[in-house]
Image: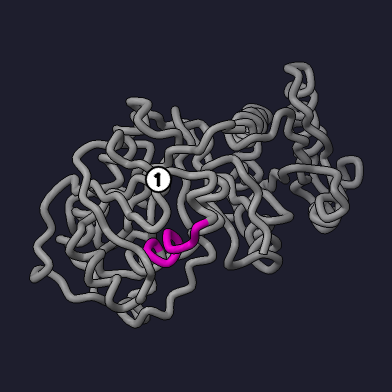
Amino acid sequence: MISRRARVGVTMGDPAGIGPEILLKSLAKPEIFEFCVPIVYGNVAALENSLKVTGANVKIRAIDDPAGAKGETGIVDVIEPAPLDLSAFVVGEGNAATGAFSAGCFNAAVKDGMAAKSDAVIMGPASKQAQNEGGYKFAGFRETANHFTGVDDTILITLGDTYNLARVTTHVALSDVPRLCSRENVLRVIRQSDDGMKSIGYAKPRIGVSALNPHCGEGGLLGREEIEAIGPAIEDARAEGIEALGPYPGDTVFLNMKAGEFDIIISMFHDHGNSCIKLAEFGTLVNLLAGAPIPILTVHHGTAFNIAGRGIADETNLVCTFYTAAGRKFSR
């Protein structure tokens, strides 16, 4: 846990999306400044335009260096990493200019974080398509952050109010999942989940590991991954002092966490874990990049170009992300 106010670098996301609006709405809340010194990476003029739309009771101040951010209630301190031509895009329509700018802001925030000028970094909602058009050819948040940090071996942890989730496999064909749920891969994700949860304040995370096969494979009748890979990986982790538990049947493991037995669940494949956690907590979920040199987080939603510029976007997810970045627990 961070004992002082956390210094958090946060990008405004794609300037054509809802990022500037939810950022201003979040920073209009005095409680954010009780535990956080926000350092915004964005564009003053774009934020001033969004201020007219949201009516947020804040003032925007340009600064040259993260040290200039004081965390004063009602003051949004903004670093401009690069120029942004407001005539080059229309709010609600991301393009190469907005994609390049949002990625550049994220790069600057990560560099400052790695230089110990902030404690954590939040990426506002960005468009993968716009960033690719702008020259940043990465599949998503994790790949972009990997490039900027120079670290490839990372995983995404999804954090909620009650449920936290990591996955051994993500965007792969279901037919490839059993092969990828190897002892080595399961152990790697257990280790990274342990490190990631510790980075946001859990002293000794309790990690519940899900099975791959129904009923944990029924002693090998329904599959041997639990016997040959998942179970041994859990034992390896426990030998290292990690509190890994399981494997538990996939259809009940979330009930175990609801009962308070775990701090995080590791699912073997994307849709098993994501379906459960999104059903339970969509709207307050936060993505944490575990394995990075510093805590790097992002909201669990996109740019919402369809409602950008109307001042109606809900800032709750970004507020949750500020709490998490500072090692605090957010509850509705």
Q: Is residue 9 visible?
A: yes
Does 25 appear in magenta?
yes
Q: Which residue is mark 1?
A: 71
Give the quarter of the image for residue 284: bottom right
Amino acid marked by disc 1: Gly
User: Residue at the location (26% across, 40% down)?
Assistant: 108
* Magenta stretch, overall SS: helix
Q: Quadrant of the N terminus?
A: top right
Compared with residue 238, is residue 94 higher up or lower down, i.e. above or below?
Answer: below
User: Residue at the location (39% across, 61% down)?
Assistant: 23
Instruction: Determine whether, in the image, residue 137 is placed left or right of residue 274.
Output: left
Residue 31 picture location, percent across and down: 54, 55
Judging from the image, the colouring scheme is: one colour
User: Residue at the location (78% across, 31% down)?
Assistant: 244
Stretch of the chain drawn in magenta: 23-30
Give the quarter of the image for residue 251: bottom right
Residue 83 picture location, percent across and down: 11, 53
